[in-house]
Amino acid sequence: MSTINYAMNELRKESAIAGTIKRYGKQLLSFIRERVGSLEDAEDILQDTWYQFSNLTDVREIESVSGWLYAVTRNRITDFYRKRKTSRLEDFTYEEEEGEREIRDLLLLDDSADPELILFRELILEELFIALEELPENQRSVFILNEIEDKTLQEIADEQGENLKTIISRKGYAVKHLRKRLLPLYNELTNKP
């Protein structure tokens, strides 16, 4: 291929990419924003999509550009949630106070557009409730009131007529049990031995 032909092909490719970005940019960003929390994350995902699009050898070979763009964008969103849930599980396993909040936030995410997140959440909830049933009632109650119903430990102590240190101790035992019990699931989901 001559230098002139190569240059012409590159110009056509750049023109096709620029036209596609102009045509689909706002639609894709809106599509992503409905599925992720922040504009910054949405823009990063969109940038990944455009990068992959620009690396195609011949854009004209794609039968449906919009179909291709939305398929790639969905994959980027799925990758985003995969990375996000892995880091949150790490927080749950290794962080003392923040971990339980992180797993709660993950379990409460809007997953209506992500079948993998739905499956993941169902698996975690099932294992969590099995592990909760293994706890003594007083530990289970403190954990649920604090982590799921979002009551402070002081509120729980006042309601149950117990010393705050007793409530803190019960919560600590519950968290320790749940971490130990859910660690194999965490390792399985993150492919750790």
Image: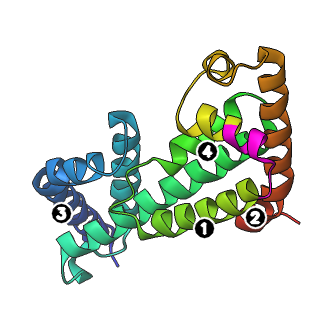
According to the picture, the residue beneath numbered tag 3 turns out to be 16
In three-dimensional space, the C-alpha distance between marks 3 and 2, rounded to whole angstroms, equals: 46 Å
Marks 1,2: beta carbons within 8 A: yes
**Callout 2 crowding tier (Cα within 10 Å): few <14, some 14–19, many ≥20:** some
Q: Is residue 137 magenta?
A: yes
User: Which residue in the protein does label 4 denote?
Assistant: 103
Inter-mark Cα distance, 1 to 3: 44 Å
Q: Please, is residue 152 above or below residue 81 in the view?
A: above
Q: How far separated are the C-alphas under marks 4 and 2?
A: 13 Å
Q: Earlier in the sequence, mark 4 or mark 1?
A: 4
* Residue at disc 1, secondary structure: helix
Q: Identify the residue at image location x=56%, y=48%.
A: 84
Report the mark closest to the observer, 1 or 3: 1
- The residue located at (10%, 56%) in the rendering is 23
Against 83, residue 88 (above or below) is above
Which quarter of the figure has residue 145? Answer: top right
* Residue, disc 1: 123
Q: CA distance from mark 4 to mark 1?
A: 13 Å
Which residue is at a point 65% across and 52% down the rendered structure image?
86
Assign the N terminus to one quadrant of the image: bottom left
**Residue 185 marker:** 2
Q: Residues within 10 Å of mark 1 (few under 14, many from 20)?
A: few
User: What secondary structure is found at the residue carrying circle 2?
Assistant: helix
Q: Is residue 19 magenta?
A: no
